[in-house]
Image (spheres, helix red, strand yellow):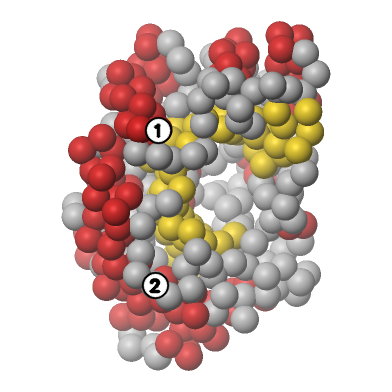
Amino acid sequence: MLTDTFGRRHTYLRISLTERCNLRCRYCMPEEGVPLSPRDHLLTFEEIERLARLFVRHGVDKIRLTGGEPLVRQDVEVLVERLGRLDGLRTLAMTTNGLLLPKKLPRLKAAGINLLNISLDTLRPERFTDVTRRQGFDLVLRAIDDALEAGYDPLKVNCVVMRGFNDDELGDFVAMTEAQPIEVRFIEYMPFGGNGWADNVLVPFHEMIARIEERVGPLERIHDGPNETSKTFRVPGFRERVGFITSMSAHFCAGCNRLRLTADGALKVCLFGTAEVSLRDALRAGATDDEMAEIIQAAILRKKAAHAGMHELAASDNRPMILIGG
């Protein structure tokens, strides 16, 4: 189960809990916003738990909760507690913008969130307001401090790099890895519906490396596992690592072990693929677990070897990132 025609075994499921977010990041959401699904189109907690249990039964051992912003989903802690009890689940992770994290973190950690990523694209307050179209910079910094105090080691900080906006801050982000258990992950700007992607705004991975090394000297390459999305390095003598998510300039499709479940219940076997299968509709039509497994496996067998390339993706009719899940 969960193995495609290229021998990739899928052990990692990303579940979007909501299409809503309390920020409006330019690379994620069109300026005019997005049409949200009616509430009854979204998966219920019971449906999410049933699907998660089914995926884990068939080999998934890592689940990441995303959004939108997952923490705006009402009673999200209840769902985390349910998922945290799944036998066979090794990692229960969450990606968040951090605004609501401080008041929810103790219960989330107790419920089983054992890996945490916080999104932060700039270390300058005025730029934060520009890219997110909202206030909240100080709240994100507090969330990072609280997560470190809670013992997340490493705590991962995600940064989408855009030319002319934050590419002059690469060295400042790398400095965060010197003494604290913070792993910074630089993400190449990716094209999605309505996010204004252009290749002249993309900063390729090799250029990021060169610019960082101008400031800190040669980086030390670290061996990555067969399914890692990140090309990982370390500044000699620094405590933590720096990763590069190179989806555009050096894709990692050959080792992809990820599946995505959108908030409205669609299974996407590729982040950049437009093909979707509604697991919600099958559930609500009364499909048994065996029938659901057949639907899931059939979708995985249709997965392509690799995505089409950045210019082709920019011209495709994919969802906005916020409606897919970060």
Left or right: where 235 falls relative to 132: right
Indicate the quadrant where residue 146 lies: top left
Left or right: where 85 falls relative to 289: left
Left or right: where 113 falls relative to 227: left
The kind of secondary structure element at disc 2 is: loop
Label 2 Cα neighbours within 10 Å, binned few <14 / some 14-19 / many ≥20: some
Residue at image coords 28%, 62%: 81
**Residue bearing the label numbered 1:** 148
Indicate the quadrant where residue 128 lies: top left
Residue 103, given in percent of the width and then of the height, sits at: 20, 38
Rendered position, 54 above or below 259? below
Q: Marks 1 and 2, Cα distance to the nearest angstrom?
A: 26 Å
The kind of secondary structure element at disc 1 is: helix
Rendered position, 30 above or below 164? below
N-terminal label among 1 and 2? 2
Residue type at the position of mark 2: Leu
Residue type at the position of mark 1: Leu
In this rendered view, identify the residue nearer to me: 326 or 319: 326
Residue at image coords 59%, 60%: 258
Left or right: where 95 falls relative to 135: right
The image quadrant where one finds the N terminus is: bottom right
Residue at image coords 58%, 53%: 271
Residue 109, given in percent of the width and then of the height, sits at: 32, 50
Numbered badge on residue 86: 2
Count how many numbered circles sit on residues in the image. 2
Indicate the quadrant where residue 41 lies: bottom left
In this rendered view, identify the residue nearer to me: 244 or 17: 244
